[in-house]
Amino acid sequence: MKPDRIEVSKSFNYGFVITEQELRRIYDTLVQQMIQAIGNQGFDTTFKLTYKNKITAQKPSLDDVLAENNGGQWEVQSLKITITNQNQPEYAHIALNFQKSEKDSIFYDVLGTDRNWVFVTISFLEERINKVKRLLWQKYAKKTLQFVFIPLGILYTIAFIETLFPSFVIFINESSGSGDRSAYELGFSIGASFHFLLVELLLILSFVAISTVFLFFPSYNFCWEDYGENLKKKQNIAKFILIGVLVSTVISILSSIIANNLMH
């Protein structure tokens, strides 16, 4: 009589950062769990890679995977690790897939004949996934740029122009001798224009910060060889930009406070 099989699959929509160290830990977890399931029967392991140029390849070992230059057209887009019982693959199987995709970016499938083993394996897998998963900052940054900053920037630019135009009209009236009231109105209008300009500046700085996150902090990362080195360089540039944005924001706010005190 064939034993009952228990199979559990699950997918996640997270970003991830997989370094060489984390990948080795993930692989060690899979191996240890398979040994517990089948003992000395032996198992087969395959590593399936998909590259940016759409070519797929299978590697026999983890060292072969990590030896890939992982850059340019050969940048890794997905990695699937599969471990199966060598003699009876239909009774013991662990698969774990990472891919650069907004849907099902992380996926696992565990099959076995022992319910306890299946759920213990799942708990270990999810623990390792939690170590590498990241929020989809790039996705959120893109939506924020599209639906928040660009519309707000347009609205505030229009509002700034509308507050600036009366200043010129009042200034012309004052030059022709219209009196103190026009001077007061001129000061009020210029003050309003200054505040709109400050908000516009803060919006621009926020736009730069969000754009930096979008450009330099990708959601999905296989961080070894060329890709890992390039990512470090990009993020160093991003940190420099973000520090500049922070300093500029502080200076802008302080300037606003000083100008507001002088006007009163």
Image (cartoon, rainbow, N blue to C red):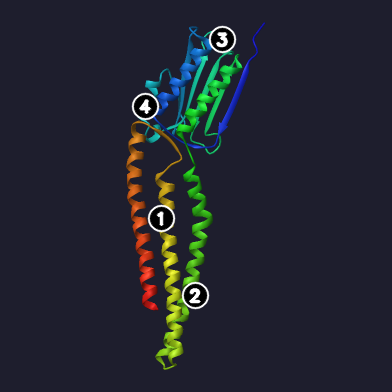
Does residue 58 show up?
no
Q: Count numbered badges in the picture.
A: 4
Mark 1: few/some/many CA within 10 Å (<14, 14-19, 20+): some
Q: Residue at x 38, y 74 (%)?
A: 261
Image mark for residue 88: 3
> If you read the primary sequence from the N terminus, does the residue marked by circle 2 or circle 4 appear first?
4
Residue corresponding to mark 1:
208
Q: Nearer the viewer, residue 231 or 24?
A: 24
Q: Mark 2 and mark 1: span between their CA atoms?
A: 25 Å
Residue corresponding to mark 2:
162
Q: Nearer the viewer, residue 161 or 136?
A: 136
Do the residues under discs 3 and 2 have CB atoms within 8 angstroms? Answer: no
Q: Is residue 12 left or right of residue 29?
A: right
Mark 2: few/some/many CA within 10 Å (<14, 14-19, 20+): few
Q: Residue at x 41, y 53 (%)?
A: 209
Disc 4 element: loop
Disc 2 element: helix
Q: Is residue 106 shown above or below 176?
A: above
Furthest residue toward top: 1
Q: Position of residue 37 (x, y in %)?
A: 53, 13
Kindly identify the amino acid type of the residue bearing the numbered disc 2. Glu
Q: Is residue 103 left or right of residue 225?
A: right
Residue corresponding to mark 4:
68
Do the residues under discs 3 and 4 have CB atoms within 8 angstroms? Answer: no
Which one is closest to the eye, mark 1 or mark 4? 1
Mark 4: few/some/many CA within 10 Å (<14, 14-19, 20+): some
Kindly identify the amino acid type of the residue bearing the numbered disc 3. Gln
Do the residues under discs 3 and 1 have CB atoms within 8 angstroms? Answer: no
